Amino acid sequence: MSNANVTLSMIRSGQAYFGVDNATYSAEIKAVQKALFRYGFYPGTPDGYYGNKTAAAVRGLQNEKGLTVNGLLNQGTLQSLESWAGTIYGNPTATPSLDKVRKGLDYFHVGDSGYA
């Protein structure tokens, strides 16, 4: 299985999925790993490779959400992750939606610095 030409857009549309592939680096896989890390499923530093650690994290998410547990990041699994994390972008030049920007500004205007 190769993730070389797979994109999150393809996964969202049900055309493809990410599976274990230790040879292919992807910024989109790294973005997925970061989202899995934020929600306590990914135990380590995101590296952009869909290896056994990523598959285990995906299985944990699938189990938590009542999905078929197979370790593949498919359409249903991505939808579940994005229901928590919002739309995941692997491309750092992607522009967030206006709604996300407004929410960020609302947070900023409240005056919460994020420090305890």
Image (cartoon, rainbow, N blue to C red):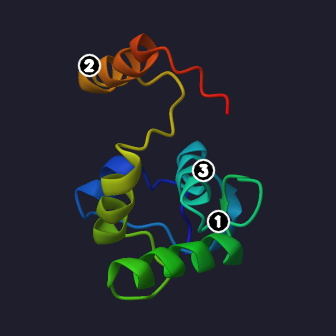
Q: How far across and how far down the image is residue 73, in percent?
A: 44, 69
Q: Is residue 8 left or right of residue 44?
A: left
Report crowding for label 1: few under 14, some 14 to 19, many 20 or more residues within 10 A (C-alpha): many
Residue on which the image places disc 2: 98
- Quick one: label 1 or label 3, which is nearer the N terminus? 3
Quarter-of-image position of residue 100: top left
- Quick one: label 3 or label 2, which is nearer the N terminus? 3
Is disc 1 placed on a helix, strand or loop? loop
Residue on which the image places disc 1: 42
Q: How far across and how far down the image is residue 114, in percent?
A: 60, 28
Q: Are marks 1 and 3 in contact (CB under 8 Å)?
A: yes
Q: Is residue 93 left or right of residue 85?
A: right
Residue at image point 55% right, 75% down: 1
Report crowding for label 3: few under 14, some 14 to 19, many 20 or more residues within 10 A (C-alpha): many
Q: How far across and how far down the image is residue 101, in percent?
A: 35, 19
Is disc 2 placed on a helix, strand or loop? helix
Q: Is residue 76 above or below residue 98?
A: below
Residue on which the image places disc 3: 34
Residue furthest to the bottom in view is 69
Report crowding for label 2: few under 14, some 14 to 19, many 20 or more residues within 10 A (C-alpha): few
